[in-house]
Image (tube, rainbow, N blue to C red):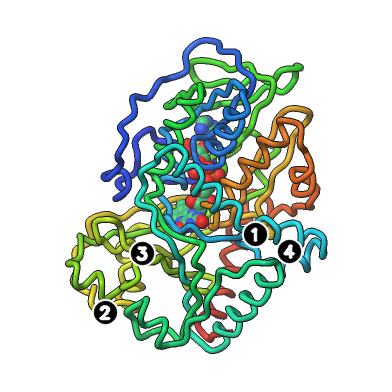
Amino acid sequence: MAKAGNYAGAGQYPGSYYAASRNIERSPKVLEGAVETDICVIGGGYSGLSTSIHLAEKGYKVTLVEGAQIGWGASGRNGGQVVNGLNASLDTIKRRYGDDAARFVGGMVQEGAQTIYRLIEQYGIECDLKRGNIYTAYTSAHMRELEAKKALWESYGMSDHVMLDRNALRAEVGSTVYAGGMLDTSGGHLHPLNLTLGEARALESLGGEIYELSTVTRVDQSSEKPIVYTEKGQVTARIVVACGNAYLGHVIPELTDRVLPASTQIIATEPLSEELARKLLPGDKCVEDVRYILDYYRLSADRRMLFGGGTIYGGTDPADIIAKIRPNMVKVFPELENVKIDYAWSGNFAISFTRVPQMGRLGKNVYFAHGYSGHGVTGTHLFGKILAAAIDGDQSRFDTFAAMPWYPFPGGRMFRAQYSTIGSWWYAFKDKFGL
Ligand SMILES: Cc1cc2nc3c(=O)[nH]c(=O)nc-3n(C[C@H](O)[C@H](O)[C@H](O)COP(=O)(O)OP(=O)(O)OC[C@H]3O[C@@H](n4cnc5c(N)ncnc54)[C@H](O)[C@@H]3O)c2cc1C
């Protein structure tokens, strides 16, 4: 169960469809005693794994320390939607940080997905990759929003988007609720936990060391080489990279106020008949709608509908996930009203105040990346690559991100979730009235 506060790792995977269908069974090795390494990475999600692999590929000795198991956090529980770009639109980045920042981010918004595809290909990772993701629109205002997004992305040289009118969308999504949508042929979907497990194996093949069930309790930054303490051991490294995202809690106090944990939930139906699956999602692409509090869904490789949604600021789990998510699914696909739900789970992601993910450095040798704000499958892979380049001496892209100002959530630690909840009511109101 996910809870806010200090590190919440529970050791075992949650009762998700992904955990039940994982294709690599690891034998976790616990950190005991003292270890010396070049780079110590905290967190075995995509941020930590991407950073570690890119560093190991450059010849660094990497030690990754995970409190639970590889992919235990958001990376092994998410919707599996490979969506290009960051949560904050290029327009928002331009408004907040200026033209140069938008051009800079615009030049790399497809690099995260390309990095994932490269890793899958190069290391033979089996994770049910399928190409294409669709954004759906409920109203003509949403359609205009998508058209503007397409034009904006084209202005940055991306030409993989295709507008879908109501009929064209119906050929991809067998639901009557939408006014249309937009296809991104360069996105896709995959089994997220199997991606993390494959990446862990890739890291080990490069000589990287992975410790699991080894919670980091503190990082001592007082000497030349930082020391990462776990319950039973310690790692002394030249550089530490903190990739605990929403689950890091207050382990590195300087990072606590930068992001807010939020939870979102997914249900997995029993396997659908081939006929029904083809009727609901004929093109087998993944789908998310454009609302603030959005639905996201896709078919698994064994034809289950994996349907996600909802956001709870503060990162707690709802009392009854199925009662919360099933009605949303049935609104889109009434055919699924009586279908059995085999799995339901929740996970935490980290939101930054501007919805732009953050990377930076504390002192001389503790780096961090977090705050992908719900769109992190691609962003994490990109940020890991940029962090690795920075540690290897090419600071150019790191410096631009690190220089972007960040803002704490109003209300301090006590009240920030409440403020964000008020914000989410406003967004739910806007969604309801199509504003
Ligand atoms: C239910 C859900 C659905 C989502 N769907 C999508 C989607 O479809 N598409 C998309 O782009 N994004 C999605 N996201 C967001 C995306 O999954 C995240 O942005 C991304 O996985 C973050 O990766 P990460 O490595 O930074 O963090 P995580 O994957 O959370 O990894 C952090 C790891 O650090 C470990 N850790 C933390 N503290 C410590 C400590 N003190 N000691 C040791 N280890 C520690 C944790 O155990 C955890 O394994 C979703 C998120 C959730 C929760």
**Viewer-nearest of discs 4 and 2:** 4
How far is the residue under mark 1 from the one under mark 2? 33 Å
Among the two numbered marks 3 and 2 on one chain, the one whose residue lies closer to the N terminus: 3
Query: As shown in the figure, which amino acid type bears the numbered disc 4?
Result: Ile
Q: Residue at x 75, y 62 (%)?
A: 102
Give left or right: position of 163 versus 333.
right
Query: As shown in the figure, which amino acid type bears the numbered disc 3?
Result: Arg
**Viewer-nearest of discs 4 and 1:** 4
* Disc 3 Cβ-to-ligand 1 distance below 8 Å: no
Residue denoted by label 1:
355
Q: Residue at x 49, y 42 (%)?
A: 119
Q: Please state the horizontal and vertical placement of residue 426, each as a whole percent of the image.
A: 59, 75
How far is the residue under mark 3 from the one under mark 2? 16 Å
Among the two numbered marks 4 and 1 on one chain, the one whose residue lies closer to the N terminus: 4
In the depicted structure, whether residue 338 falls above or below residue 117:
below
Query: As shown in the figure, which amino acid type bears the numbered disc 2?
Result: Pro
How far is the residue under mark 3 from the one under mark 1? 24 Å
* Disc 1 Cβ-to-ligand 1 distance below 8 Å: no
Q: Residue at x 36, y 59 (%)?
A: 266
How far is the residue under mark 4 from the one under mark 2? 38 Å
Among the two numbered marks 4 and 2 on one chain, the one whose residue lies closer to the N terminus: 4
Residue denoted by label 2:
334
Among the two numbered marks 3 and 1 on one chain, the one whose residue lies closer to the N terminus: 3
Quick one: 317 or 76, which is closer to the camera? Answer: 76
Give the SS element for disc 2: helix
Other residues around mark 2 within 10 Å, as few (<14) / some (14–19) / many (≥20): few
How far is the residue under mark 4 from the one under mark 3? 29 Å
Q: How many marks?
A: 4
Which residue occupies the extreme top position in the image?
33
Give the SS element for disc 1: loop
In the depicted structure, whether residue 382 falls above or below residue 309:
above
Other residues around mark 1 within 10 Å, as few (<14) / some (14–19) / many (≥20): many
